[in-house]
Image (cartoon, grey):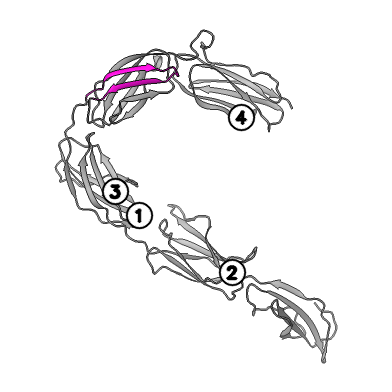
Amino acid sequence: EYGDRVREAFEIERRREDESEFYTIESLSPNSLSFIDTDVISGYTYFYRVMAINSGFKSSYEKTLSIFTLYPPIIVSADTSIQSKIILNWSYNSSVVDGFIIHKSKYLNSSSYPIWSEYSILDTVSGEQRSIVDSNVYDSRFFMYKIYSFKGSLISTSSGEVIASPQQPIPNTPSNILLSLTSDEGIRIEWENENIFETNIVIERRGVNLSDNFEPIVDSNFINHNYTDYDFLELTEYQYRIKCYYTFGYSLYTDTFSVTSPQFQQLNPPVNVRGFQTDSGTVIIRWKDRSDNESGFKIECFAHNYGLVLIGVAGTNEISFEEMNPLITGNVKYRIFAYNPHNVSEKIEFYIDIINSADDEENVPAQFSLFNNYPNPFNPTTRIKYSIPAGEIQCAVKLKIYDVLGNEIATLVDEYKSTGIYEVEFNPEELSSGVYIYKLQYGSYSASKKMVLLK
């Protein structure tokens, strides 16, 4: 700004932080009231002062102003000439910045409109670097980048955004295919996947008269590079072929491989089945395996009004099973049988006398109960008691606290419980005074009561 006094011109002087003297960078007309300096290098602090000139006389300087310049780099190119890589190149007119921060976003496929992921930091590089190679470009068709310069704790605005689409490889065809029959009457397919990135595998099959078209039977990501097929007719010729795919395309098919499915054999049931309960309450069931084509053994029990319940599965060739927390008490009927995807053996029934540590007159509840908390009102803690009767299937007990608006405040219990009487302490250190509700859920049973916290 300048008053009404007569002047002939203005002179702008400037000094960079690494210079000792000011020098004139521009002379302006007497009507000028602003100046834009474009001859600056990013990363430096500049000092400016202005004087008025009239007939050879110069005014004094009112003040000296300083400004730090930190500009973003300019992205020159996103080079995709190398397969599965994006090379970012940028320019910068200074070497005094500490470095550059490269941010990356990827395109998310959407059937309705395009969506880009949130930007994340790809890398931070030194101030001398002018390019970076991004090799992690397998999970999208498009990637977007922007770059920031920084010096100390100061960060520039971002460069313009650039979008790049890398050249993606076509997946390699699976190799070393091997078909074999398994002991549990399945057809096992094995292969090798030599792709450097994860691919999904498509297994196709045709059978019966081999004039049918191939149909996919599985499409998944196989970490172990094998799959066992059980869904077929016995003594039938089948042909298989495999291909893999990634986001950007399919591989070629493998050759076609043929195999005749096995004949389904009868499963022999386990023998010498016996069961007992240990002093700790665990039920142990043991047997002798007479079958060589089972996938495993299933163990069931009859749980009063609930009927037949599967309590566990033992693997191939296993000869024992442990039930840590028995479902019910009394003289309980169990049964066990061998199975595979095509057959089950005869089901062997047996009985085990099951008792519970709470099975005495004082400790065996006759019904579900949720008792009043004590004390009530309370501060700072209260205790909540509940009971679970005998003869019920063991299931998860949930005891939760709610405010009067129905918002869940705390979960005191969320676990399986057998017959017995239980008590839990509630210590609401961070809650304010008021009315709260505690609710018990056990299978189809539910009960709730109110309690008052006074602080």
Amino acid type, residue under disc 2 in the picture: Pro
Amino acid type, residue under disc 3 in the picture: Val
In the figure, is residue 249 to the left or right of 60? left
Q: Residues within 10 Å of mark 4 (few under 14, many from 20)?
A: few
Picture quarter with the N terminus:
bottom right
The residue where tag 1 is placed is 246
Amino acid type, residue under disc 1 in the picture: Tyr
The residue where tag 3 is placed is 202
Q: Quadrant of residue 300?
A: top left
Question: Label 3 to label 4, Cα distance in Å?
Answer: 49 Å
Secondary-structure class at tag 2: loop
Q: Quadrant of residue 86?
A: bottom left
In the figure, is residue 419 to the left or right of 40? left
* Residue 219, placed above or below residue 440: below
Question: Label 3 to label 1, Cα distance in Å?
Answer: 11 Å
Q: Which numbered disc, 2 or 4, marks the residue that appears first in the sequence?
A: 2
Q: Which numbered disc, 3 or 2, marks the residue that appears first in the sequence?
A: 2
* Residue 435, placed above or below residue 102: above
Foreground residue, 340 or 25?
Answer: 340
Specify the segment rendered in magenta: 268-289
The residue where tag 4 is placed is 406
The residue where tag 2 is placed is 72
3 or 4: mark nearer the eye: 3
Magenta run includes residue 303: no
